[in-house]
Amino acid sequence: METMTATKKNITKDFLPINGTDYIEFYVGNSRQAAHYYQSAFGFQPLAYAGPETGVRDRASYVLRQNKIRFVLTSPLQPEGNISAHILKHGDGVKVLALWVDDAEKAFDETVKRGAKPYLKPQSEKDDFGEVKRSGICLYGDTVHIFVERKNYDGIFLPGYKTWTPHFKTKNTGLLHVDHCVANVGWNEMNQWVNFYEEVMGFRNLISFDDKTITTEYSALMSKVMSNGNGRIKFPINEPAEGKKKSQIEEYLDYYRSQGIQHVAMATNNIIETVTNLQDRGVEFLKVPATYYDHVLERVGKIEEDLAPLRKLGILIDRDDEGYLLQIFTKPVQVRPTLFFEIIERKGAQSFGAGNFKALFEAIEREQALRGNL
Ligand code: FE2
């Protein structure tokens, strides 16, 4: 594909080795209810809690886990302060993309030396289970990266958190790990953040999509996928592009009131089972027209799955040089049309479903039009 370009830059030494995504922290209006939603709808398991009962006076954070995915849901207990301001401005959304590193101080020093704006100076937190070191840098909008060093810690989550064991339990839905997290940035800002990830974080540009690839009759966007040295972390970055009508990225920016995280993609080994389960629990997905399935196998070739359940659930299929992938997108999970989730099963393919962009974005535009924002 002509729009797919791998960078020619060779990263000789990874100055920021990252083991994986450590956790994603959401600032939400009511973390107690949000925690119930992620348990009942998505099958997350209760893990830890910090709040007034554990000596934290200004917030209540619930930590949920499903296999390697950890979500922290945090609400403030008073109108003053950064968390309340964040929620007032953005609505519910992602505040922290936490990255698991071996040396939080070095991660901070190396990135700040290269131009990152500090968010959290390296600090040590201790309890009976050991020590965690954390540091942080600012990203687009009010989003931040926190570097987490936990090699000297064997507690449940972080110092200050207690095990959370509510009576309510649900089965998990087969979500395994975070596959990628996508950011929306403003007009002419994509390359600035591509440069940030290249120069400050030592990432490389894996794939680029221009506005001719990602376009519908009405709106367009551009996207570049940034990946770290070992390929475990992937951050696509979207920017709106000119179209006849308002880009879905602009709608996000209008409602989130700044750049921020658009979607978090979570991997499964059995997307038909996972999505059936999620749908039964009330998760709402975007649907492409049934005609999508009429010719899809001509485009993607042979797949292991029967087409019928994919068609019934609205699961999309795409293929690249290395294999194929199955994916589906939820509707936004809060009242503002901002954050949503992707469920993805990779059968060899390492790409992001470019062949689905048009069908998918037309589905998003139908929802956008219903909101009066197209
Ligand atoms: Fe995605």
Image (tube, helix red, strand yellow):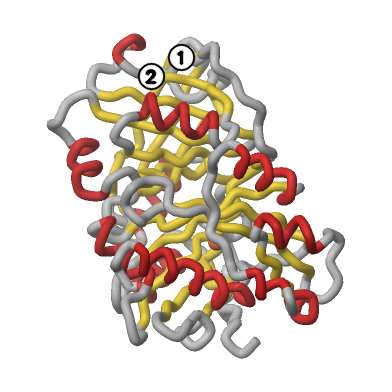
Q: Tell me the quarter of the picture where residue 358 sits.
A: bottom right
Give the vertical position of 132 relative to 328 (above or below): above
Residue 56 percent across, percent down from the top left: 29, 17
Q: Can residue 16 be spotted in the picture?
A: no
Residue 104 percent across, percent down from the top left: 45, 40
Q: Residue at x 51, y 66 (%)?
A: 226
Labelled pair 2, 1 in contact (Cβ < 8 Å): yes
Which is more N-terminal, label 1 or label 2?
2
Q: Left or right? Give the position of 121 relative to 234.
A: left
Q: Which mark is residue 50?
A: 2
Q: Amino acid at mark 2?
A: Ala
Give the vertical position of 123 relative to 107 (above or below): above
Q: Left or right? Give the position of 260 relative to 346.
A: left
Q: CA distance from mark 2 to mark 1?
A: 6 Å
Q: Amino acid at mark 1?
A: Lys
Q: Secondary structure at mark 1?
A: strand
Q: Residue at x 54, y 11 (%)?
A: 167
Q: Can residue 87 be spotted in the picture?
A: yes
Given residues 307 and 76, the one toward you in this image is: 307
Where the C terminus falls, by quadrant? bottom left
Which residue has dot 1 on it?
A: 162
Residue 6 percent across, percent down from the top left: 60, 79
Q: Left or right? Give the position of 345 relative to 297.
A: left
Crowding near the residue tagged with mark 1, few <14, some 14–19, many ≥20 C-alpha atoms within 10 Å: some
Crowding near the residue tagged with mark 2, few <14, some 14–19, many ≥20 C-alpha atoms within 10 Å: many
Q: Residue at x 61, y 52 (%)?
A: 343
Q: Residue at x 56, y 74 (%)?
A: 357
